[in-house]
Image (cartoon, grey):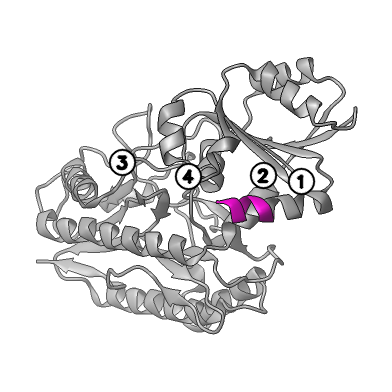
Amino acid sequence: MRQRIERLQAAMAGNGFDALLLIQSRDILYYTGTAQPSWLVVLPGIYRLFVRRGFDRALSECRLDPSCVEPQRKQNEVFSFLRNLGLPRRAVIGTELDVLPAGLWNGWKAETPDWEYRDASPLVLRQRQIKDPDEIASIRKACRIEDEGHRRALGVLAEGVSELDVAAAVEDAHRRAGHEGIFFMRQPDFFMSRGLFASGPNLLRISGVASSLTGIGQGPSVPAGPSGRVIRRGDLVLIDIPVLHDGYHVDQARTYRIGAATYRIREMQRALEELFDYACTALRPERTWSDAFRRVSALADRLGADPCFQRMPDGSTLPYIGHGVGFELNEPPMITARNSEPVLPGTVIALEMHLLEGDVVLKMEDMLLIGEVASEFLSVTPRRLFEIP
């Protein structure tokens, strides 16, 4: 944790920050080892964790020097600490403007009118993108937990059961294997069920609360995820339910068929599997994310899958084929045609692709670790279509 903070301190000066004031729970957890409500103050050579609530728990979990952790409920005392360190009058303070509540922002500005607040989230997320060996080990464990849900799905999927019954069985298997029961998305007012689930015609009914295929949920309050629809023979079923273990997410999806698949479905599945195999080799250091996106898209065209590649039910096209995963379910980078950033080893990607043709929808999503020489799928569930007798 100290090394993470030291790397953050080294990056501060080049980005024009006099100090950082971090409050988002995933960022606090990443740098300290606890998610208790806190302010993390970071300056060159100095850091302090001010714990608002749950101090005893925070102190037992925190991996920082205990002398740098103290209880503090009063916001003005945190600002006094910063002032006493001799910050310039018009200091530039970095914080997470992408998730900072407006009410809190107004209070900060009223108390420190001369300070300029700038968004430090890109700096933090860039550091979080590269996973160390311990982080990768946690993600590998989460992949095994994810596979337990897949195994339970194979045991309960059948004609006559409801989407909700299957989703509940998958979630139960995840929890019993070590899933922490929630997932985090770095956006305000995000809401969803515990994951995406759709069968039959519900595969073609999408909601605006997520970018990809969603299912319909149980009503307008949470319009995504499993519904009470009874699964029928001949249905395709998508299960896209993530897990969280030791703070790290796994985002994985598989498609199932109730009964034998048609020739066309199997051909489409073979094309999807080939796209995944190729993407694993296309995503390598010294290329850009946009280059990898274009290479995979070109293969879809050569396979004759371009008209249905990443196609959405409304006729639009999903503009990405994957996203970063870590302390939050959707993190940078996005693998799009516009992302010209370099592919960096140590990045963990949720590679996410689907084919849609008529009423046939096939999707897979897997965890991919970008290596120095070769990339590696961390997910252990076989990448194929599962036909349920």
Give the Cα separation between the discs numbered 2 and 1.
18 Å
Q: Which residue is mark 2?
A: 121
Residue 330 drawn at (x, y percent): 51, 51
Q: Residue at x 41, y 53 (%)?
A: 249
Locate residue 115 relative to residue 189 in the image: left or right.
right
Q: Secondary structure at mark 2?
A: helix
Residue 261, visible in the rendered structure = yes
Locate residue 246 relative to residue 168 in the image: left or right.
right
Frontmost residue, 143 versus 13: 13
Q: Which residue is mark 1?
A: 44
Give the Cα separation between the discs numbered 3 and 1.
37 Å
Query: Of marks 2 and 3, which one's residue comes earlier in the chain?
Result: 2
Foreground label between 3 and 1: 1
Residue stretch in magenta: 1-7
Q: Residue 206: which disc?
A: none
Residue type at numbered disc 3: Gly
Give the Cα separation between the discs numbered 1 and 4.
21 Å
Q: Residue 33: which disc?
A: 4
Residue 22 drawn at (x, y percent): 64, 36
Residue type at numbered disc 1: Pro
Locate residue 330 relative to residue 76 in the image: left or right.
left
Residue type at numbered disc 2: Ser
Query: Of marks 1 and 4, which one's residue comes earlier in the chain?
Result: 4
Q: Which residue is mark 3?
A: 181
Q: Residue furthest front?
A: 67
